[in-house]
Image: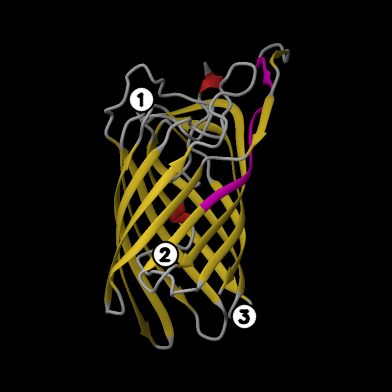
Amino acid sequence: MKRNIFILIAGLLFSIQLQAGGPWPTPKNGGFFKLSQWWVVADKHYTDTGLLDPNITSAIYNTSLYAEYGLSNRLTGILYFPLFSRAVFNNEISGTTSELINSGEAINSIGDTDIGLKYGIIVNKPVVLSASLYLGLPLGISSGGSTGTLQTGDGEFNQLLQIDVGTSFGVGGINFYASAYGGFNNRTNGFSDELRYGVEGGATLPKTGITGILRLYGIKSLKNGDSTETPNSTSIFANNSEHFTISPEIAYQFNDKWGVSATYAQALSGRIIFANPSYSFGVFLKI
């Protein structure tokens, strides 16, 4: 049973919210491209009642490409593609006899992929507004390993409609921005629909290339899916998963085009979600 609780961390942390995003469309023929490594290793989780409970040490690793390209000054194409996804659970060892109870397993594949369009409703104003539609393509493995509980995908096609609003300003030579979003995620194949929400703010220090970002975001399940769809899973694609997460990020831009970033994410509360933090490191290119 413990093996069957390998669940989500923060923001469905393949989450597009951990990328560039925001309400600002990419200018026509401009682009943002990021190659990143994201991972979580967890030995405890929030149960479906929000309490903490231990589990077999489990992990998932994703090497992914995120891209934004300006189709026009208002319309941006978006892609999130996990090039390589690895889901693992360790050996299960008896705490009294130290004997092997169950051997660990791992699967490797590409992961579930998001494609989307963002449209700038209000642009070039003190406050900007955009609307986005993301389609989640089930390209990963939804049932792997000897027990079928290892996953790099959820096997369902989902559609997320999202509204973003934001502003940017300068104070004392420091560039600040703040934004917020809300969205509705329609899930299929027996999974419950979700409400997604978040706020973030950031500041770029002058003449350093350093930007600091702080995000707070979450997911609320509507619990309207198939009751036979088990809430516990050995993947980050659990049904009825909820969380409220804090995620600081720091980015350093070498020049006008190239930079690196590092992100930490920790669920402050949740249901059917890892209690351990996730980490991400990436290299990005701006055009």
Q: Which mark is residue 190?
A: 1
Furthest toward the bottom, the residue is 172
Which corner quadrant of the image does residue 98 belong to? top right
The majority secondary structure of the magenta stretch comes to strand
Q: Are marks 3 and 2 in contact (CB under 8 Å)?
A: no
- The answer to whether 233 is drawn above or below residue 86 in the figure is above
CA distance separating discs 1 and 2 = 31 Å
Residue 39 circle label: none
| Residue bearing the label numbered 3 | 255
Instruction: Give the structural element (helix, strand or loop) at label 2.
Output: strand
Residue drawn at 39 percent across, 57 percent down: 117
Residue 131 at what x, y percent from top left?
30, 59
Quadrant in which the C terminus appears: bottom right
Residue nearer the viewer, 41 or 150: 150
Q: Secondary structure at mark 1?
A: loop
**Disc 1 crowd, CA 10 A, few/some/many (<14, 14-19, 20+):** some
- Residue numbers of the magenta segment: 80-95
For the residue marked with disc 2, what is the amino acid? Thr
